[in-house]
Image: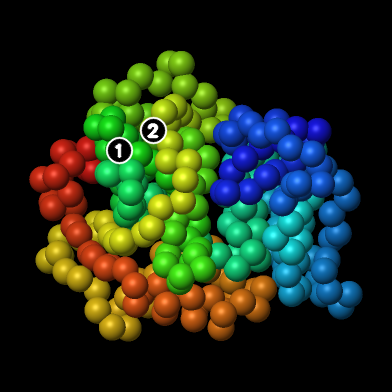
Amino acid sequence: MKTYRAFGLNFISDLEIPEFLSGSFPREAADVEIFSGPVPQILNKDAEPKRLQARGNQFLMHIKNVARFWIEGGKRITYQLDENCDLDNLRLFLLGSCIGALMQQRGHIVLHGNAISFDGKTCQVFVGDRGAGKSTLAAWHFKKGAYILADDICVIHFNEKGTPYVIPSFPQIKLWQESADLLGIYTSTLRRIRPQDHKYALPMNGQFGKDPLPLTDIIEINTKHVTDSDAIGVEKLHLLIRHSYRHHFVRMMGYEDAYSKQLIKLAGQVTIKRMNRITLENSAGPMIEV
C-alpha cells in the first residue's frame, strides 16, 4: 500500500503514482482509495454497457485497451485493466477524467485550466479550448518564477466564509515537445506522459504552490483575434460552464442544479476576462503561438 497527498487529500493506492506527493498516514486517515479490483459492466440493471455510465454518486468509465474505472462517492476509484494496458496510459486517465469525476462527486467546481500565483498570496486561473496554450503559458511563468497550483484540472472550493479557493493538485506541467523547444526546456531527462506521445512531465520542484490560495481572476485564452473584454452578467456563467472539466459528467451524475448554483456564486466573486493571444504575447512572449 502506498500513501500520497494531492488535491488537499490523503490518497492510498496499490499503484505507483509518481505524479503525486508522497504522504505518511495510517489507512484510516485516507480520504480516497485507488485500488485494482472487479468493475461492473453496468450500473443499472436494465441498461446496455456503455463507455460512460452514471447512477447517483457512482460513475463508470471504460477506455478501450486501457481499463474500466469505477468512481464511487468521491472516496474510491477501482480500476480493472484491459489486456496489454501499460501503466502510463492507466495513470493518464486515472489522473484526468477519474479524478475530475471524483472531485465533482465531492462537491467541488472543476475547471479545465491552469492555476498560477504571481505573489504567493492569490492566484489566477487560465482557461481555454484545447490547444489554446494553457500549459505553455504556465510553463513560461514557471520559468519566470511563478508558483503553479494546478495544470489541466483546476479544483475550486469555497471556504467557511464563502471565498473561492483553488486547491493545489500535484507538481507537474504537461508539455508538448514543440512548446518545450520554444521555451528552451530540454526534454531528454523528462518522463513522457505516455510512450506514444511527445508530451512530457515537467516537474515544478520548489515552485509548486502547496497551499490553497484565494482565486481573484479567471482569464480565458481566446484563440480568435477578438478585443480583450470582461465577461459580464450571464456571459460569466456561460464561460464557466464551457470551461468546466468534463461538464457532461456533472449532468450524468445529476449534479447540474447544485453545480450551476456554485458557478453562479463563483461568477459573482471573481473577475472573468477574455484575452486574445496578441495580448498574452505582449506580456508573456511568443510562446503562446504553439
CB contact under 8 Å: marks 1 and 2: yes
Residue in view at x 65 percent, y 78 percent:
254
Q: Residues within 10 Å of mark 2 (few under 14, many from 20)?
A: some
Identify the amino acid type marked 2. Gln
Kindly identify which residue carries mark 1.
Answer: 146
Q: Quadrant of the N terminus?
A: top right
CA gap, disc 1 and disc 2: 7 Å
Residue 259 sits above or below residue 91 on the image? below
Residue in view at x 81 percent, y 42 percent:
27
Q: Secondary structure at mark 1?
A: loop
Apparent side of residue 187 relative to residue 76 in the rendered image (left or right): left
Apparent side of residue 60 relative to residue 209 in the rendered image (left or right): right
Residue 181 picture location, percent across and down: 29, 26
Q: Earlier in the sequence, mark 1 or mark 2?
A: 1
Snapshot quadrant of residue 50: bottom right
Kindly identify which residue carries mark 2.
Answer: 207
Residue 177 picture location, percent across and down: 37, 29
Snapshot quadrant of residue 149: top left
Residue extending farthest top: 188
Q: Residues within 10 Å of mark 1 (few under 14, many from 20)?
A: some
Residue 109 sits above or below residue 35 on the image? below
Please tell me which residue lies in front, 192 or 139: 139
Q: Is residue 89 visible?
A: no
Please tell me which residue lies in front, 82 or 123: 123
Residue 66 picture location, percent across and down: 70, 43
Count the labels in the image.
Answer: 2
